[in-house]
């Protein structure tokens, strides 16, 4: 518990010194500093911390540093007050301009997170499902998502704690990532050897050993942070006489931002000369990924030896104290990466077993997908066949419909259709009636009326009587 509290306390100072663009020199009279106008485009251009919220973190620290009250409290507040959260509470006393800009930064960050959530949601195929932004924003602990509009004391407290924890684990994750990189490189080499015949395999193994020996054949590497190592920088980089080496002058020369501390980037720049002895990007045997891991190892070693309060910064006092230790004057030899394999044989075995399981799972998934593809193709063939049958049925129905709608055959020769003959006969009868004498016409009309009456009577009779009546009418 004590360790975590100390780490949290020290990181407040780390974040400010590491991320601020305009650090305050130690000898500067802070009472005469004028608060500069705060502008959103003045975001610092410092080194990336590697955190996914790095820009938000840097901009918040930058604007807080531009407030005279907060900056003074930061440098004058003791550890106990910081531990009790009093530093975060000082946010209530910063200038209105700074608070307004912090509110704007938070709104921009919330919108950025919402955009990322939506993009990931779309990639996972959830276009038709509503996104619960409030629920998903809970995973981002470095801000209070329940209040997306204003930057409050709780937001600063969350940001400091999250950055402290994430940056503490950042180096560990980098080491693990490098270990996986090295094991994968060795795995690929072994798999490549399996594809070669015996003679080719021997030549490949010989070449591999030659490259290893060539890489190991380099000038002596000084112990990082030792007097010999710093003197080489003093002579080769600074162009000064090694006999005139002075630790305090050296510190001031390489405190590039003049804040009175060596941060991690300033420390790592001191090791460039040593790394050039080990790695050359033009050489086949030198791996630049390994070079960056070596740089990280050197920086961590110096921090462990010199950073007494574990704030990930080296102050002038800490540096001067370290120069009086035996390790500074008479250091042990430095063991490089080729002398310290990144993984054990057991880790390599477990890694290859893990890769084998992954490969087996991929093969199984590939086989399952092939089966699904075959089944889909079979179903597609069935659908195509049904489509052909349906089209044939539609064509048959169309032919039948066309045959029913065809016009009657044309009249051939002088043949008169039956209906037309009947119509002509009716017309002739009508004309004949018009030329009959009145008496004859009257008689024919009476006969027609009698026949109609008889016909009506015949219809009114029962079926049996209708037959008898019909017989009577036929008798003369």
Image (tube, helix red, strand yellow):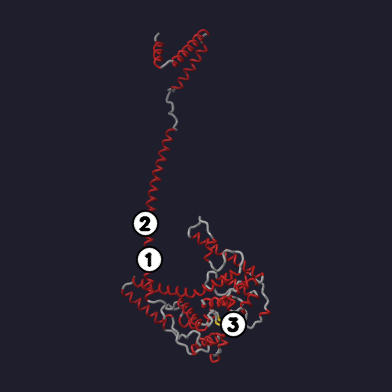
Residue situated in front as seen by the camera: 432 or 16: 16
Residue for point 52% across, 62% down: 136
Q: Quadrant of residue 200?
A: bottom left
Residue at point 43%, 35% (across, down): 401
Q: Quadrant of the C terminus?
A: top left
Give the image location of residue 249, x and y in percent: 58, 87
Secondary element at image label 3: loop
Q: Secondary structure at mark 2?
A: helix
In percent of width and height, residue 293 lies at: 46, 77
Mark 1 secondary-structure assignment: helix
Residue at image mark 2: 371
> What label does residue 428 carry, if any?
none
Residue 323 image position (x, y, % from top left): 53, 88
**Which numbered disc, 1 or 3, marks the residue that appears first in the sequence?**
3
> How would you rate the neighbour count of disc 3 (Cα within 10 Å): few for under 14, some for 14-19, many for 20 or more?
many
Q: Residues within 10 Å of mark 1 (few under 14, many from 20)?
A: few
In the rendered view, tell whether residue 272 sits above or below residue 57.
below
Instruction: Kindly report which numbered mark, 1 or 3, lies closer to the viewer in this rendering.
Output: 3
Give the quarter of the image for residue 410. top left
In this rendering, the answer to whether 115 lies above or below 204 is above
Q: Toward the viewer: 316 or 161?
A: 161
Q: CA distance from mark 1 to mark 3?
A: 53 Å
Q: Earlier in the sequence, mark 2 or mark 3?
A: 3
Residue bearing mark 3: 260
Q: Identify residue for label 1.
A: 359
Q: Are marks 2 and 3 in contact (CB under 8 Å)?
A: no
Lower position in the chain sequence, tag 1 or tag 2: 1
Q: In whole angstroms, how far apart are the C-alphas of marks 1 and 2? A: 18 Å
């Amino acid at each position: 518990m004590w360790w975590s509290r100390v780490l949290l306390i020290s990181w407040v100072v780390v974040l400010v010194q590491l991320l601020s663009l305009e650090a305050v020199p130690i000898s500067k009279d802070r009472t005469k500093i004028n608060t500069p106008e705060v502008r959103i485009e003045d975001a610092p251009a410092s080194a990336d911390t590697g955190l996914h919220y790095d820009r938000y973190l840097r901009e918040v620290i930058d604007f807080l540093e531009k407030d005279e009250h907060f900056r003074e409290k930061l440098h004058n507040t003791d550890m106990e007050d910081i531990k009790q959260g009093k530093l975060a509470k000082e946010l209530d006393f910063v200038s209105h301009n700074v608070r307004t800009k912090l509110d704007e930064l938070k709104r921009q960050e919330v919108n950025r997170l919402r955009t990322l959530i939506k993009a990931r949601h779309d990639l996972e195929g959830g276009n038709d499902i509503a996104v619960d932004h409030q629920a998903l924003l809970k995973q981002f602990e470095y801000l209070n998502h329940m209040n997306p509009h204003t930057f409050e004391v709780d937001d600063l407290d969350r940001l400091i704690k999250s950055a402290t924890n994430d940056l503490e684990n950042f180096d560990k994750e980098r080491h693990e990532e490098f270990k996986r990189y090295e094991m994968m490189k060795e795995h690929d080499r072994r798999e490549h050897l399996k594809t070669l015949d015996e003679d080719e395999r021997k030549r490949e193994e010989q070449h591999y050993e030659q490259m290893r020996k060539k890489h190991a054949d380099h000038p002596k590497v000084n112990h990082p942070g030792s007097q010999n190592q710093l003197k080489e920088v003093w002579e080769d980089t600074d162009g000064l006489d090694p006999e005139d080496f002075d630790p305090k002058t050296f510190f001031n020369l390489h405190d590039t931002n003049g804040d009175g501390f060596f941060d991690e980037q300033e420390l790592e720049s001191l090791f460039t000369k040593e790394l050039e002895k080990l790695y050359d990007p033009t050489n086949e045997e030198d791996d630049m990924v390994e070079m960056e891991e070596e740089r990280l190892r050197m920086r961590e070693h110096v921090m462990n030896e010199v950073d007494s309060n574990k704030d990930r910064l080296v102050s002038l006092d800490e540096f001067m104290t370290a120069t009086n230790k035996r390790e500074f004057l008479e250091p042990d030899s430095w063991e490089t990466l080729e002398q310290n394999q990144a993984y054990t044989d057991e880790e390599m075995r477990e890694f290859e077993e893990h890769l084998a399981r992954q490969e087996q799972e991929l093969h199984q998934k590939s086989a399952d997908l092939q089966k699904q593809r075959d089944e889909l193709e079979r179903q597609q063939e069935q659908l195509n066949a049904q489509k052909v049958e349906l089209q044939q049925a539609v064509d048959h129905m169309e032919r039948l419909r066309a045959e029913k709608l065809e016009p009657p055959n044309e009249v051939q020769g002088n043949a008169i259709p039956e209906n037309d003959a009947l119509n002509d006969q009716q017309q002739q009868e009508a004309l004949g009636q018009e030329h009959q004498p009145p008496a004859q016409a009257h008689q024919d009309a009476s006969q027609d009326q009698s026949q109609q009456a008889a016909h009506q009577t015949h219809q009114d009779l029962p079926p049996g009587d209708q037959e008898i009546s019909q017989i009577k009418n036929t008798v003369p």
